Image (cartoon, rainbow, N blue to C red):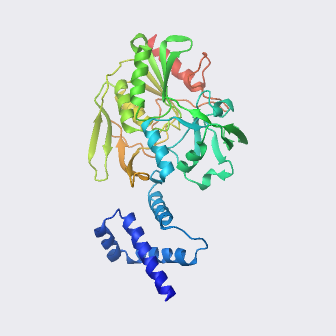
Amino acid sequence: MSNQVNWKRALKQAVAVGLILCVGLSILLGALIVTNYDNLGRLVRVVYLIDTKYLHETPLSKLIDGAIDGMVSSLDPYSSFQDEQENKILMNSIKGELGFGGVGVIVNTADPKQLVIMRPIKGSPADRAGLEAGDVIKKIDETNVSTISQDQAIAMLRGEPGSKVTLGVYRPKTNQEFSVNLIRENINVPTVYASSLPGRQDIALIDISSFTAKTGDEFEQQLQDLNISQYKGLILDLRYNPGGELYSAIKVAGFLVPQEDIVHIVDNKGNINTQKSTAQYINKPLVILINEYTASAAEIVSGAVQDCGSGILVGTKTFGKGVVQTVFPLDGSTSVRLTTDKYLTPKKHDIHDKGIAPDVEIALQKDEKPTILPEKPLFDSQLAKAVEIMEQMID
């Protein structure tokens, strides 16, 4: 009798899980029962075993979240399930609402397999501790980053200002592992920085660290604040930029190319939606710095400029993330992020898993630290080459 009750309870839980996993579509569930009986039977069996044999009592909500997480993460490296905390961080990141307690690092979200620092934010705890672009965070306190999702790791980096966190770091360029103790601070930073190039006041230098919903407007504002018309040329640094919000990238690209077509978005049915420029072309000599960490939305900008021929790409081949994710809210506090589209450059090049090759290839030297928005005319090898090319274009 007891086993019968347990089976009934397990069956009810399995049906509940199945219903939620199928987004409440009873027709789809019916089709699953008819055409995929074995898989549904495994689901019932696992729920029953957890309910009757697992050492600890486990709420159904935890099983459901775990089932959704496993199902979505099995699709591809970029699709994911966000619990309440992760969803809040993701939404704030997309919106560009970056005020939070943290250590002050921008990490690579294009490569979900590891937590690579794209750059430390100037003046932040991470910057003061000497962390550099390219450093890999291996541990956060006692947690091995490889055992948790990237969203979970980012959530662990954040916390109340004044709280302490210890990072285990690997530095590939020197093959060193070390630990740093940091105290979290309030972090609020724009994604676009601009200045005159040190030593050449007639060349503008703009750095974009990532793309949020505010980046396009920030870029436009920086062009206005610089009074870009007074400059002979522009160097745009997209190195260590993991990408982000699609439409901000389209707006930024619109300032940099004279043509209308910026990117072609291809959905799962093969339909093509061509996104066109929404900005006024600045018509200036342009050099864009790229590297192996330039990804996603940053590649949309780079690809548009290269296809149009309105600028020269300098550096190393980009990451190669040519797919688009869409975030779907589930219940107001959780969400799923699914790969829904791929994108092609204006000339319909598919750069996914291929990257974009620079027009002028040059890598940083061994142990060379990148100079992002330098305050003195001391440039890394890639920026120095960009300056050399720009001087040839304008002089």
Which one is nearer the viewer's eye here, 85 or 227? Answer: 85
Whether residue 282 is visible, yes or no, is: yes
Please provide percent x and percent y for residue 338: 40, 52
Which one is nearer the viewer's eye here, 181 or 377? Answer: 181
Q: Vertically, is 73 above or below 243?
A: below
Please provide percent x and percent y for residue 276: 29, 33
Query: Horizontally, is 19 left or right of 116 in the view?
Result: left
Please provide percent x and percent y for residue 4: 47, 86
Q: Vertically, is 146 above or below 22?
A: above
Whether residue 347 is visible, yes or no, is: no
* Tally of numbered discs: 0
Please provide percent x and percent y for residue 158: 58, 42
Q: Quadrant of residue 285?
A: top left
Q: Which residue does the image show at 46% across and 76% down from the upper left?
A: 42
Which one is nearer the viewer's eye here, 56 or 122? Answer: 56
Which one is nearer the viewer's eye here, 342 or 128? Answer: 128
Query: Horizontally, is 146 left or right of 90 in the view?
Result: right
Q: Quadrant of residue 185?
A: top right
